[in-house]
Amino acid sequence: MEPFDRERPHHPYTRMQEGSDTLVIFIHGFFGSPRQFWGLSSLAWEKGYSVASLLLPGHGGSGKEFNRTPGHQWVYAAMEQIRRYAASYPRVLLIGHSMGGLLALHASRFPWSHTAGVFLLNTPMQIRITPRGTANSLQAIFGPQKYLGPVAKRYREVSSVSRMAPPRYLGMLPRVADLQKLIGRVQEELPQVQAPVTILQSMRDETVHWKSAQTLAAGLKNAPCRVVWLLDSWHSYCPPADKEQVRREFADFLERAGQKEETP
């Protein structure tokens, strides 16, 4: 049985594994959805881990609701949910895509989070706007479903915020500013992270500059860090070869995290 509900793709989900002492928590990004993690959460569940996928405030509903939700609520809600889950699990693994990776790093600094490892997917230290990304976003938002290419189709699937009239997208600008503030905050906090971190970054990411991975690795001075490059992926779309690479890296991450230190 899958740990999520396909009939409610943008709903958060939790499934506890009997006998597991480790919970894997998935955190989506800006405009993202718990749906993004179906494949990885299934893999974690199959390997005997409990899983939970969060839905951040302002997501899962209308564009108007998103625009009215200040960024500090993302941070507060993620920390409160992680704190609540960690109270029942001595070991927590935090998985974040994009902004969700920033929230994972932020939470991992606190002893109460019980963080035993962090797995990052295209986590921003530097945001960029590209013609390729703009064209794909316009297609994903406004294009007829039957004419969408595989990239735009995936972007529409994993966006939990309903489409808006074009002028309403300008209302997102304060939320983009909130994201930039969060980037700056987490960049200052990187030396405080001590849990092992795996960084996956697409070289062709149209939203996050590939140098973000280098900035993260340089800032993680007190944490074991591994950087993996995805050659052909977009920010939220992986072609089959890269998708399989992500799956392999995640399986290795789970295996390493599962190797508990022996008590002398």
Image (cartoon, rainbow, N blue to C red):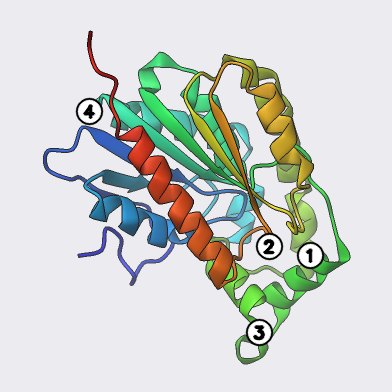
- State which quadrant residue 177 falls in: top right
Mark 4 or mark 2, earlier in chain = 4
The answer to which of marks 2 and 3 sits earlier in the sequence is 3
Name the amino acid type tagged 3. Leu
Instruction: Measure the C-alpha gap from mark 4 to mark 2.
Output: 36 Å
Using the rendered image of the protein, determine whether residue 120 is visible from the camera's viewpoint. yes
Q: Position of residue 101 (x, y in %)?
A: 57, 39
> Quadrant of the rendered structure where residue 20 is?
top left
Spatial CA distance of label 1 from label 4 is 41 Å
Q: Is residue 76 left or right of residue 236?
A: left
Residue located 29% across and 37% down the image: 23
Is residue 159 visible in the rendered image? The answer is no
Whether residues under marks 1 and 2 lie with C-beta atoms below 8 angstroms apart, the answer is yes
- Residue beneath label 4, please? 88
Could you tell me which secondary element the residue under label 3 belongs to?
Answer: loop
**Residue indicated by mark 1:** 133
Secondary structure type for disc 4: loop
Q: Which residue position is annotated with label 2? A: 234
Image disc number at residue 148: 3
Tag 3–tag 4 contact (CB < 8 Å): no
Disc on the earlier residue, 3 or 1: 1
Mark earlier in primary sequence (3, 4): 4
| Marked residue nearer the N-terminal end (1 or 2) | 1
Q: Position of residue 88 (x, y in %)?
A: 22, 28
Q: Amino acid at mark 4?
A: Ser
Asked if disc 1 and disc 4 are in contact, CB closer than 8 Å, the reply is: no
Could you tell me the amino acid type at mark 1?
Gly
Residue at left offset 52%, top offset 49%: 28
